[in-house]
Image: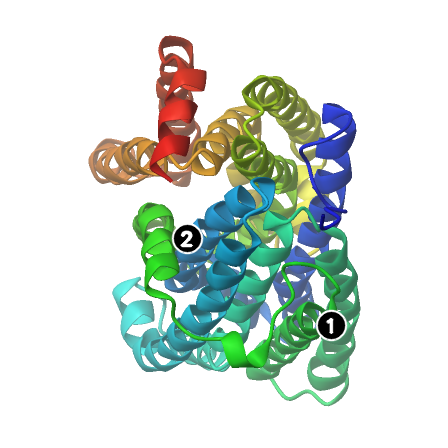
Amino acid sequence: MVSKRHSLTEGSIWKAMVLFALPVFLGNIFQQLYNAFDAWCVGNYINDDALAAVSSSGSLIFMMISFFNGLAMGAGVVIARAYGAEDYEEMSKTIHTAIAFGLVTGALLTVFGVALTPTILRWMGTPKEVLPQSIEYFRYFFLGGIFTVMFNIFVGILHAVGDSKHPLYYLIFSTFVNIGLDMLLVAILDFGVWSAAVATTASQGISALLCFLHLLRVDAPYRVRFRKIRFHKGSLGKIIRYGLPSGVQNSVIAFANVVVQTNINSFGKAAMAGCGSYSKLEGFAFLPVTCFAQALSTFVGQNLGAGQHRRVKKGVTFGILCSCTMALVISVFCYIFAPKLIGAFSETAEAINFGTEHMRTICRFYFLLAFSHCVAGVLRGAGKTTVPMFIMLACWCVFRVSYITIALKFVNELTTVSWAYPITWTLSSIIFLIYLLKADWIHNFDKTLKKA
């Protein structure tokens, strides 16, 4: 019998969940440091135009990579199921198919990202004085698009088998590389805003390489072998089946957020710099949400594969409560220290005021975002990927864009845009809660398992 050293199907539920989620949490902190340090560095060593160029990157970058990352999530669901069921042959086929898929889609992302950057930025209404530096930063960033995709593929594989520690180690190392390169290229050599993107791309490439080398050497059923990296028809079909809804959901929601960013851009570069600074901080604030959502997805997938439905239900309750509680604590911290947090990126009073107002409007509702993401993670782990897709598309895309389009005609203020997030998080949380309360989800899990 093969040892399952990272399995989440045995022992204490809370211990298994926390020991998996904690490295994910810490790893996400270091991953967020990539763009956050880029923004800090250019804001302090170049100017506010450069800060606006880098800070407005979140929506565009997420829109370009989120589809491929959603497909990687689909691979994770299949791998976690197979690992829990000890079907190592199916797991190996899925892993090698996912890597082949990542290489192809990563190359496509690189090409299209570099080619379409100017068009998208102009469509977003980026101010003329910021546009040249924005194009520079995004183009160099997307030159490393394949590294971003492959890193997420490798991390998805490791998370699916319950290993969240090795990605953390590699992220810590590559983050320090990124900080060192930023200081060298931007602060010391004064190469400009494009060099911050080069630092991030190089660091992402290093972390992807380290993950790959680990998968090549690990003595476990999920070990990768070069000769097996190819498309397996059945495995590719399952990856697309479970990943396509998440990919579509991520991309369309990201598109909606690009619309939000476009409206923020209309308030000028001070609003761009302030709200962009918040977006970097927001990434850190969302970490309890993302780490427990990922933990829940893996936990549910493995335990469904092992047929442990009662354990699934207990783990889901624990994970959601932990995530929402942590989100509330972070909300209080963000509300109190908003001016100082935004001020770390810019010394311009107008930018700080915009960012503070934006942050204080949104941060009070982080617990709702946590709830929605955790329930979505549970359903993805159960293979029910279309449910969160439809709920989030309806609330976070259609309703969000409609609200902004209509509301700004009556109240043309930045706060109107800021409220788009709390309102749509509230709506999605209500629908998710109704779904969980009304659905016999253990029965639904059983049905999903039989189809897999």
Which x, y percent locates residue 64? 38, 64
User: If the image is split into quadrants, where does the C terminus sit?
Assistant: top left
Q: Residue 420 sits in which quadrant?
A: top left
**Relative to 27, 405 lies left or right:** left
Res. 70 mark: 2
Are discs 1 and 2 less than 8 Å apart at CB? no
Which residue is at 36% across, 67% downward? 127
Q: Nearer the viewer, residue 65 or 331?
A: 65
Which x, y percent locates residue 203? 67, 75
Q: Residues within 10 Å of mark 1 (few under 14, many from 20)?
A: few
Return the residue at label 1. 217
Q: CA distance from mark 1 to mark 2?
A: 27 Å
The amino acid type found where label 1 is placed reads Arg
Which residue is at 47% across, 59% downward? 94
Q: Is residue 53 visible?
A: no
Q: Residue 121 sits in which quadrant?
A: bottom left
**Relative to 7, 86 lies left or right:** left
Q: Earlier in the sequence, mark 1 or mark 2?
A: 2
**Placement of 407 over or under 41, stated as above or below:** above
